[in-house]
Image (spheres, rainbow, N blue to C red):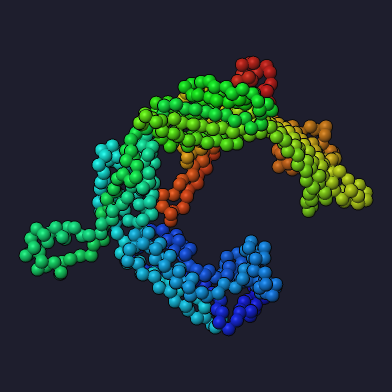
Amino acid sequence: MGIFFSACNYTKHLTENQILVGKNSLQLKTQKPIKYKGEFESAVMAYAQPKPNTHLLDLEIMPKFKLWKYNNKFSKYKKDSLNDKILKHKIEAPSLIDTILVRKSEINMKQFMINQGYFYATVESEIVPTKDPKINDIKYTINAGKNYIIDKVTTETEDANLRFLINTNNTNSFIRKGLPFTNFSCGLEKERLYKIFRNSGLYDFKMDNISFIIDTTDRKTIINLMEDPFTQSQNFVSEIKENTTINITIKLEKTKDSSYVQTYKYKNIFVEINDTYARDKNVPETNNMLDNIHFKYRTLPLNRKVITRNIFIQPGADFNTTDQEATINRLNQLGVFQFVNIRFEKIPGEPGLLNCYIVLNTTAKMDATLLGDISTSDGDYFLGFGGSIIYRNRNLFNGANQVLLRGSYSTEFRNDALLYDTKRLYLSGSNASVTSEFTFPKFILPFKQNIFNKKTIPYTIFSLNYTLIQRIQNYTVTNATGSFGYTWKETNKKQWRLNPSFLTITKVPEKLLSNTFKTKIENNNYLKNIFSDNTIYGENVTFDFKSNPTNQLKNSTALRISFEEAGAILRGVNYLYHEISNKIFNRLRNI
């Protein structure tokens, strides 16, 4: 197949002045080694235009399959440039050399280098001929020049509180002495400081209040020259060294809003509930208060206590975006609301005070879904029919308790002579399952809820499942499982799932085993272990971690750790039962 494609002429439809892009390459010259060089070069080449046609499986040794398909129906696709296959990238038109795009790529690459701190980088491109006169490669050469290292970071502000907030939160700063300077780092630092100030009650503080002054001057040499101009000037030219450090000044100043340093507190919290699916729209409006929160509604689809438990904005507290985001996330997580909106308004005549307005629009309480499918499996069965019904209740007992019920059934038919003397279509097996899951937006026994932070209170989950697997004239297996556990998000990066109890009971009724299958089991220990009665009781815990990269060249890191124990507790109960009964009674089960 490779020989076939290699014999294809990708350029057969090109006109006299059209040249196909062969490949793009990069030669990066730096004074010092670059960390994450591979990722850095990939980021640079992302700006290279035009891009060559893709190879099959993205391997250069493979043919350009999408271009080959385009050329096979060239006349059709030439007239229809908006063909659906072209738009969905199932096929590709020839990628042609375009000097304007190449020049634009140079400009974008240089800007990228500047953003990475290489202020004097130069970018050049070259069109390189190949053996085929109708195919040229594009080669980019980048001389990065010097990259500055941060030497000193100072803060310039008239407000002592802003200076204090910066100094007490500089541990995680993106611009510190000894780090390479990049515009990207300044952008991250600007966002970090903005969040710190906003989370400290500065409601009017804006991104525009933060700016950076970059200084690449070698001030030490200038100071020495000014202190002793006659002696230093004689050796100034011979001793001058290339400056590779940079000083950064973080400037915090007022823009249009002079109250950018004003600290705000919440005075009143108002919650408006719009029951979109209420049957009676003419119910009088109700206004009341619970846990220092004002409520307004016509119908109340959800217990107010559930709502207040998931609102972290409290009267008297300083304005901060952390509580706002946590409130939105938890209210959405309840599954009862289709729309959650939070806004703040200044109180006229009361400087430093805000009213908070939370608007909640409900979603449908219940829904049901009916599914069906037809399938086939080579070797296992000839034809299969299945169906399932799913019922969901998002607000059981008006407490945002979620219930999921699912029932499914399927049958399988074979078309062979396996069970009968002649080949025929017959029912070979059936599967049935019932699943239920109950989710409660609170922490239920065995521990007290106050051991958790209010923002990370776990959800409690109960689940039950029953499955029946039947194979005609072979075997029947039933399996029942149940679990009780919790799930919670410790931070934006860490999530836990703990099941302190799960139970699985598997039954293989001997009377429903065919004689042929019994013989097969007796001669196979592996099948004997599978097709036997089992009871498993245990616990498990899963921890998920996902990092947020602080550098655009770094990859995100995901980690999952799971631990499961099964059988030890039930084995201990078995042993104690046997010992306490003075060995008169047999053990509960053979485990």
Q: Is residue 35 shown above or below 524?
A: below
> Farthest residue in the front direction?
349
Viewer-proximal residue among 379 and 201: 201
Q: Where is residue 359, by image quadrant?
A: top right
Q: Is residue 381 left or right of residue 578?
A: right
Residue drawn at (58%, 26%) of the image: 297
Residue drawn at (34%, 33%) of the image: 263
Q: Is residue 490 shown above or below 419?
A: above
Viewer-proximal residue among 94 and 372: 94
Q: Where is residue 92, by image quadrant?
A: bottom right
> Farthest residue in the left direction?
230
Q: Percent x, y for residue 516?
A: 84, 41
The quadrant the C terminus occupies is top right
Q: Percent x, y for residue 360?
A: 56, 32
Q: Percent x, y for residue 557?
A: 48, 48
Inspect this view and state whether residue 196 appears. no
Viewer-proximal residue among 259 and 476: 259
Q: Where is residue 338, by image quadrant?
A: top right
Residue drawn at (48%, 79%) of the image: 128
Q: Percent x, y for residue 404?
A: 67, 33
Residue drawn at (56%, 79%) of the image: 18
